[in-house]
Image: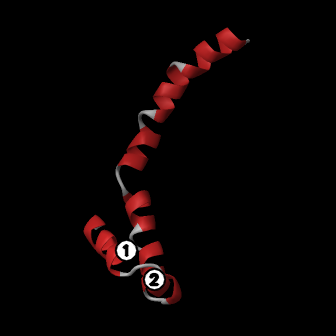
Amino acid sequence: MPVPVARTKRSLPAPPVRVSLPPSPLMRSPPAPPLMISSPPLPETLSLPFPPLKRSLPPPKSTTEFA
């Protein structure tokens, strides 16, 4: 997926991409949203590391130290 995005950005300088309609929607719709939202890093980070880490260490320590 990252290969076509790099090639599209390098092939089309700036004016053609911004002025043309096909390149704009294609680069902003499929590559960005699906890659960032569908990527496993996001769901995994928000599902396991975030909740446990924030509820286990930050809350108690920060509340006791600051308060």
User: Which color scheme does this rendered protein use?
Assistant: secondary structure
Whether residue 26 is visible: yes
Q: Quadrant of residue 32?
A: bottom left
**Mark 1, other Cα within 10 Å: few <14 / some 14–19 / many ≥20:** few
Q: Is residue 44 above or below residue 63?
A: below
Q: Which residue is mark 1?
A: 9
1 and 2 marks in contact (CB < 8 Å)? yes
Q: Which residue is mark 2?
A: 17
Q: Is residue 40 above or below residue 24?
A: above
Tell me residue 31's x, y (percent): 39, 69
Tell me residue 6's x, y (percent): 31, 69
Q: How many numbered callouts?
A: 2
Tell me residue 38's x, y (percent): 39, 59
The answer for how far apart the CA atoms under marks 1 and 2 are is 8 Å
Q: Nearer the viewer, residue 40 or 6?
A: 6
Q: Earlier in the sequence, mark 1 or mark 2?
A: 1
Whether residue 29 is visible: no
Residue furthest to the left in view is 3
Q: Is residue 37 above or below residue 42?
A: below
**Mark 2, secondary structure of its residue:** helix
Q: Write the residue at 42% across / 80% down.
A: 26
Instruction: Identify residue type, mark 2.
Output: Val
Q: Is residue 6 left or right of residue 24?
A: left
Q: Nearer the viewer, residue 26 or 43?
A: 26
Q: Write the residue at 50% across / 32% down.
A: 51
Q: Quadrant of residue 30?
A: bottom left
Q: Which numbered dot is residue 59?
A: none
Residue furthest to the right in view is 67
Q: Is residue 35 above or below residue 42?
A: below
Q: In which quadrant is the N terminus drawn?
A: bottom left
Instruction: Identify residue type, mark 1.
Output: Lys
**Mark 1, secondary structure of its residue:** helix
